[in-house]
Amino acid sequence: MASCTTVPGRRHSSRPLGLADLTVMSALSRDYPATLRAVAAMGYTHFGFRLAGYGKSAAPELPPAEKARLVHDAGLAVGVVRYGYGRSFAEQARDAQAIGASIIAYSAAPVFFRGPALGQTTRAAFDAWLPELGTMARIAQDHGLTLAYHNHWWDHAPLEGETPLDLIAAAFSPAQVAFEIDLAWAWVGGVDPLALVTRLGARVVSLHLKDVDPSRGADRMRQLVEPGAGRLDYAALLPRLDRVTDAIGYVEVDTPADGMTAAANASRFLHNVRGDRA
């Protein structure tokens, strides 16, 4: 079971709690160091961040080494780092190794952005992409990293009878490709998140903790809220997850109205569910 260091004045637990940078991107863009210090004060132990922008036209990012230094200065551990599409995977794997990261996450297969609509592709296109994932897995291994594929709702929709997630699991061994399971996207995709994590077992090396509030409209991205503010019943789900996996959970809210408020609410709620003490 993973553990975290006790810090006076903060909530603490036998279970670490991570925060993904996407939740607080607006605050990070204004003041990266101050945002990280505030995140640590909320009771988070790990911070996960992107290694590069999500496209060649994206705004410049701090170098990974600088991000890692600021994370450590705030008293946080470097968590799962993410491949950003703006630079090559090999370059980013070298960066991840240099900062001491252990897991590099791959957010989404590009074939799901090239179809007639977001999340739509064909079995032939997906099968043709799988060798690219295999190449990334070999590069990750060469740099002492675990490659973790991150699911979205479309990864649970069958392509000629088999889901993308199952096709990846069948094509690669656990040592080659692991999974970062986003509980909310699994739920949106019609899958029981607890059953999915239980079935994948040790292949799950990271979790994304977010919730879904369908009353916020038809746009799936706008439905995403912090844990405890939606339909997933984290009060029941989290203790059960803690019994079946040691994977660290990272709060991630993709489009929050106020990321710092969402992060604070999520930390307070999740620590209370776990019965943590201040």
Image (cartoon, rainbow, N blue to C red):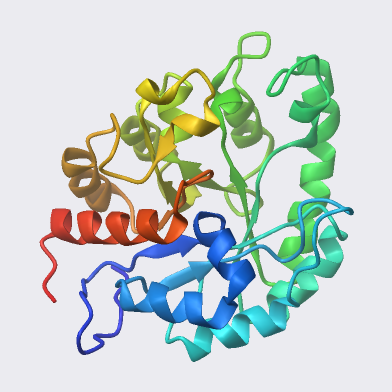
Q: Please give the name of the residue rendered at 36% of the width and 21% of the height, measured from the top-left corner.
A: 215
Compared to 131, does 117 lie above or below?
Answer: above
Which picture quadrant has residue 129? top right
Asked if 250 appears above or below 235 in the picture, the reply is: below
The residue under the point 21% across, 44% down is 240
Residue at the far top in the pictured view: 160
Q: In this view, does 117 lie above or below 34?
A: above
Side of 208 where 178 appears, left or right? right
> For the point 76% across and 68% down, which residue is it?
93
Can residue 77 be seen here? The reply is no
**Quadrant position of the C terminus in the picture:** bottom left
Specify the quadrant of the image occupied by residue 140: bottom right
Q: Which is nearer the eye, 61 or 273?
A: 61
Near-viewer residue (262 or 132)? 262
What is the quadrant of residue 14 in the picture?
bottom left
- Left or right of 181 on screen, residue 128: right
Examine the rendered structure and indicate whether residue 154 appears above or below residue 75.
above
Image side of residue 263 versus residue 110, left or right = left
Q: In which quarter of the image is the N terminus?
A: bottom left
